[in-house]
Amino acid sequence: MPIDATQPYDPNNVFAKILRGEIPNRTVYEDEWALAFHDINPQAPLHVLVIPKGAYVSWDDFSARASAEEIAGFVRAVGHVAREAGLVEPGYRLLANIGGHGHQEVPHLHVHLFGGRQMGAMLPR
Ligand code: 5GP
């Protein structure tokens, strides 16, 4: 079920547990600001989730409350992961689902990074 993007942060969400090391993950990259790991149900040859280390529900929450350092660190981490995966020349897709219409399921901000195949049209019509 999609979440309400205006809900308070739930410290027991699955990505919070991953950040605390309570649930295993296949880490691709980690730094002070972000963790990147393989999606458990990949939708492309490469499907990585990049999450900020801070407790933010959604893009809305992050863009409103995060510090400039956190935002820069997170955005740079997304770019770094794609670059290191060799995706810049062939291209890739970033996707962030927010709230109900966005069909966001996990209430900790995450950017999906898809690569390794032609992604096709942006959205189903
Ligand atoms: P959303 O719909 O919220 O944008 O996407 C949530 C994503 O998290 C889905 O692609 C789903 O496969 C992934 N996911 C959910 N639970 C886990 C988990 O425990 N580990 C990993 N690696 N990915 C998860």
Image (tube, rainbow, N blue to C red):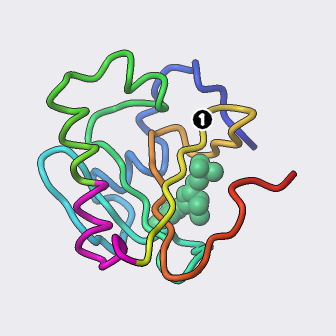
Q: Is residue 60 above or below residue 20?
A: above
Residue type beneath disc 1:
Ile
Say which element carries label 1.
loop
Residue at image position (46%, 39%) is 108
Corner quadrant of residue 118? bottom right
The image shows residue 72 at horizontal and vertical percentages of 20, 36
Residue 81 on the magenta segment: yes
Q: Is residue 120 above or below residue 8?
A: below
The image shows residue 46 at horizontal and vertical percentages of 47, 78
Closer to us: 105 or 20: 105
The image shows residue 13 at horizontal and vertical percentages of 49, 43
Residue at image position (43%, 78%) is 90
Look at mark 1 in the image and give the residue it sits on: 98
The image shows residue 17 at horizontal and vertical percentages of 38, 51
Using residue 108 as the reference point, say whether residue 106 is left or right of it. Answer: right
Looking at the image, which residue sits at the far right?
A: 125
Residue at image position (59%, 26%) is 5
Q: Write down which quadrant ligand 1 falls in.
A: bottom right
Task: Give, as a single range, the part of the protein colored magenta.
Answer: 78-89
Q: Quadrant of the N terminus?
A: top right
